[in-house]
Image: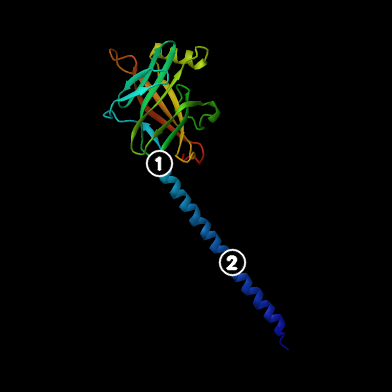
């Protein structure tokens, strides 16, 4: 005779299994949708800094000790005054999000394309907050005032020889995430130009908080 109780139990188990599979599929789909939405939001907040255009407006850069300089478009600035080395660069944010500059360091030379990004702990923290709006031109600036700082001697030697100077900038989005490191290369201008003015170009970007696209 037919065991209706057993058949009923089997039917219930099969239904439960189908329901579990459907639930699992729905959860997986929802997770994919959530990740896609999160990536879309992150992309809309992500900054990317490069050198400003040559025709960018001239900017007046002021350091906290009163030192100041005029910074032309697509230019870097290196100068020695009162035993301090002053640095600046005219840069542009081509990303859709606000850029917040966290710190800087002297980049290795003549290497430009290391596979791994420089250690975040090697960066000097900015003395003041520097923000660059999306699609806008701004500047980065810093100073090495202590003559005992190893960077002081390094920069003086590079300035004296008119050698290439690499500066790495660490920055992120307005929420404090998506940190990126961009390497800017300062190159000496032709003879006869103001020795404080240098050409500036970006040569490499590294992602810190997300996978590198390379």
Give the number of the disc on residue 41. none
Q: Secondary structure at mark 2?
A: helix
- The quadrant of the rendering that contains the N terminus is bottom right
Furthest residue in direction bottom, as rendered = 1
Q: Residues within 10 Å of mark 2 (few under 14, many from 20)?
A: few
Give the residue number, with chain letter if any, for mark 1.
97
Q: Is residue 173 left or right of residue 18?
A: left
Q: Nearer the viewer, residue 60 or 136?
A: 60
Q: Is residue 62 left or right of residue 149?
A: left
Task: Name the residue: 44% across, 39% down.
Answer: 174
Q: CA distance from mark 2 to mark 1?
A: 40 Å
Task: Name the residue: 65% across, 76% down.
Answer: 12
Q: Position of residue 15 (x, y in %)?
A: 62, 74
Q: Position of residue 167 (x, y in %)?
A: 44, 24
Task: Name the residue: 65% across, 78% down.
Answer: 11
Q: Is residue 38 above or below residue 133?
A: below
Along the polypeptide, which appears first: circle 2 or circle 1?
A: 2
Q: Is residue 52 above or below residue 23?
A: above
Q: Residues within 10 Å of mark 1 (few under 14, many from 20)?
A: many
Give the residue number, with chain letter if any, for mark 2.
21
Q: Secondary structure at mark 1?
A: loop
Task: Name the residue: 51% across, 36% down.
Answer: 208
Q: Position of residue 105 (x, y in %)?
A: 48, 24
Q: Nearer the viewer, residue 43 or 3?
A: 43
Q: Quadrant of residue 196?
A: top left
Which of discs 2 and 1 lies nearer the camera? The answer is: 1
Q: Position of residue 190 (x, y in %)?
A: 29, 16
Q: Is residue 118 left or right of residue 160?
A: right
């Amino acid at each position: 005779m037919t065991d209706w109780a057993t058949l009923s139990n089997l039917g219930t188990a099969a239904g439960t299994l189908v329901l579990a599979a459907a639930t699992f599929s729905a959860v997986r789909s929802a997770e994919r949708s959530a990740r896609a939405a999160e990536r879309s939001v992150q992309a809309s907040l992500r900054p990317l800094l490069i050198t400003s255009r040559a025709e960018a407006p001239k900017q007046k850069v002021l350091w906290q000790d009163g030192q100041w300089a005029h910074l032309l478009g697509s230019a870097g600035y290196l100068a020695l005054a009162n035993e301090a080395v002053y640095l600046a660069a005219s840069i542009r944010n081509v990303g859709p999000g606000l850029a917040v500059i966290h710190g800087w360091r002297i980049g290795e030379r003549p290497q430009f394309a290391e596979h791994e990004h420089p250690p975040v702990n090697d960066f000097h923290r900015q003395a003041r907050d520097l923000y660059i709006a999306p699609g806008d031109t701004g500047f980065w600036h810093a100073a090495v005032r202590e003559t005992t700082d190893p960077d002081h001697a390094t920069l003086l030697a590079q300035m004296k020889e008119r050698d290439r100077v690499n500066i790495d900038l660490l920055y992120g989005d307005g929420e404090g995430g998506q940190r990126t490191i961009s390497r800017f290369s300062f190159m000496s201008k032709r003879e006869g130009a103001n020795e404080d003015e240098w050409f500036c170009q970006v040569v490499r970007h590294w992602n810190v908080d997300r996978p590198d696209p390379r």
